[in-house]
Amino acid sequence: MPAPETLPYHLPRFPDDEASARAGAMAERLARRRTCRDFSPEPVPRAVIEAAIAAAGSAPSGANRQPWHFAVVASPEKKRAIREAAEAEERRFYGADGDNPKASAEWLAALADLGTDADKPFLETAPWLIVVFAQRKGGIAEDGEAQNYYVTESVGIACGMLLTTLHEAGLATLTHTPSPMGFLREVCGRPEWEKPLMIVVAGHPAPGARVPAKAQVKKPLTQIASWL
């Protein structure tokens, strides 16, 4: 097999103290990101969302197949359809209609301090919904034929880069994962080989928006890292 074509690798090299300072500054900025559930309808320029998705699209992926699609929803009618379908699933999850909840008692207890429920008004209020799809097949051509690899891992990395870029642009975000999510494929007109993975809600926070105190509690470095 012939060797693949290669290009020079370019990356700026910083002195150790500058590298540490840059990493620390980024960590401080990202530590201020919080999930927002109270959004303002204030418009956000499309160019901001485009840049964030372009950043997400530069993420590493299995065999460079780039197995993702970002369906960006701004239409009030589409947002309404998504909210109605999502809330129907959420009512089943929480048992809000008087039926037994799909979620376990332990799961519901874990959510109690976050104040979540079946009502999702942010799906209509926020100016942008970014519906993230994972492509089991398709590759770069999106033809639905070629197999993709490490799809969940690849799309997860892309979503992290999307959230990071939106936060750097000064936007509030929320990740919403109703289950099941098949309705998103229909609403967004996507093919059957794509699996909806999450909705990223993006916009400005509403005046007076608040976040649960429990959301401020993060594990310290000593609990999330080991040095071998």
Image (cartoon, rainbow, N blue to C red):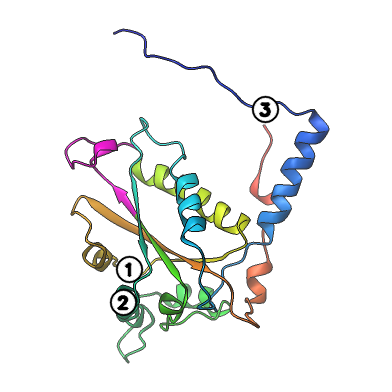
Residue 97 is left or right of residue 220, and the answer is left
For label 1, count other residues whose C-alpha is less than 10 Å away and answer few (under 14), some (14-19) or many (20+).
Answer: some
The answer to whether residue 220 is visible is: no
Q: Amino acid at mark 2?
A: Glu
Q: Which mark is residue 12?
A: 3
Picture coordinates of residue 137 (x, y %)?
23, 41
Q: Residues within 10 Å of mark 3 (few under 14, many from 20)?
A: few
Cα–Cα gap, marks 1 and 2: 6 Å
Give the numbered dot on residue 139.
Answer: none
Amino acid at the residue labelled 3 = Pro
The residue to which callout 2 is attached is 89
Which sits in the foreground, 13 or 115?
13
192 relative position to 204: left or right? left
Q: CA distance from mark 1 to mark 3?
A: 43 Å
The question of residue 202 being in magenta is answered with no
Q: Residue furthest bottom?
A: 98
Asked if residue 71 can be seen in this view, the reply is yes
Residue tagged by mark 1?
179
